[in-house]
Image (cartoon, rainbow, N blue to C red):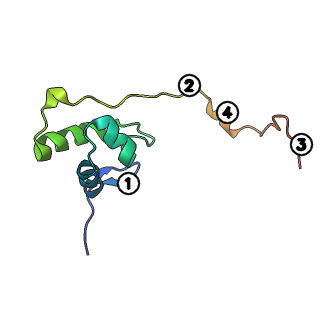
């Protein structure tokens, strides 16, 4: 049985997938994020970004000061849980 080592638990991104991203030519953390989905889950990188930076430094010899975090993209407008749980509106469509 083989064991997978996860770098991003929210999006199930493995170390093998990171290695594939680097082999495909991804150089920056932003490129790695877009290629693998790392940091796009519920934690928005709070759990995995630091681990990725450490991994790139330790295993790839990257200089820490040159590693820039990916761009944070918060929701355009905050939404309450009540709005999400409320009844659906037809938004101009006919109700069935």
**Residue neighbourhood size for the residue with mark 1, other residues' Cα within 10 Å, grouped as few (<14), some (14–19), many (≥20):** some
What is the distance, in whole Å, between disc 4 and disc 2 at their CAs? 18 Å
Which secondary structure lies at badge 2? loop
**Residue neighbourhood size for the residue with mark 3, other residues' Cα within 10 Å, grouped as few (<14), some (14–19), many (≥20):** few
| Dot label at residue 59 | none
Q: Who comes first in sequence, dot 3 or dot 1? A: 1
Whether residue 11 is situated above or below residue 89 in the rendered picture: below
Q: Who comes first in sequence, dot 1 or dot 4? A: 1
Q: Who comes first in sequence, dot 2 or dot 1? A: 1
Give the tally of numbered discs. 4
- Horizontal side of residue 91 vs 81, given as left or right: right
Residue furthest top as drawn = 77
Which corner quadrant holds the N terminus? bottom left
Question: x, y (%) of residue 92?
Answer: 85, 35
Please report contact status of discs 2 and 1: CB closer than 8 Å, yes or no: no
Which secondary structure lies at badge 3? loop
The residue where tag 3 is placed is 94
| Dot label at residue 82 | 4
Depth check, mark 4 against mark 2: the one in front is 2
Res 3 quadrant in image = bottom left
The residue where tag 2 is placed is 76
């Amino acid at each position: 049985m083989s064991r997978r080592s996860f770098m991003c638990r929210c999006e199930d991104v493995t170390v093998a997938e990171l290695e594939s991203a680097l082999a495909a030519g991804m150089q920056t953390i932003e490129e790695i994020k877009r290629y693998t989905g790392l940091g796009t889950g519920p934690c928005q990188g709070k759990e995995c970004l630091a681990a990725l930076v450490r991994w790139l430094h330790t295993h790839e010899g990257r200089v820490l000061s040159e590693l820039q975090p990916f761009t944070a993209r918060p929701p355009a407008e905050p939404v309450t849980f009540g709005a999400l749980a409320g009844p659906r509106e037809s938004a101009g469509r006919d109700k069935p």
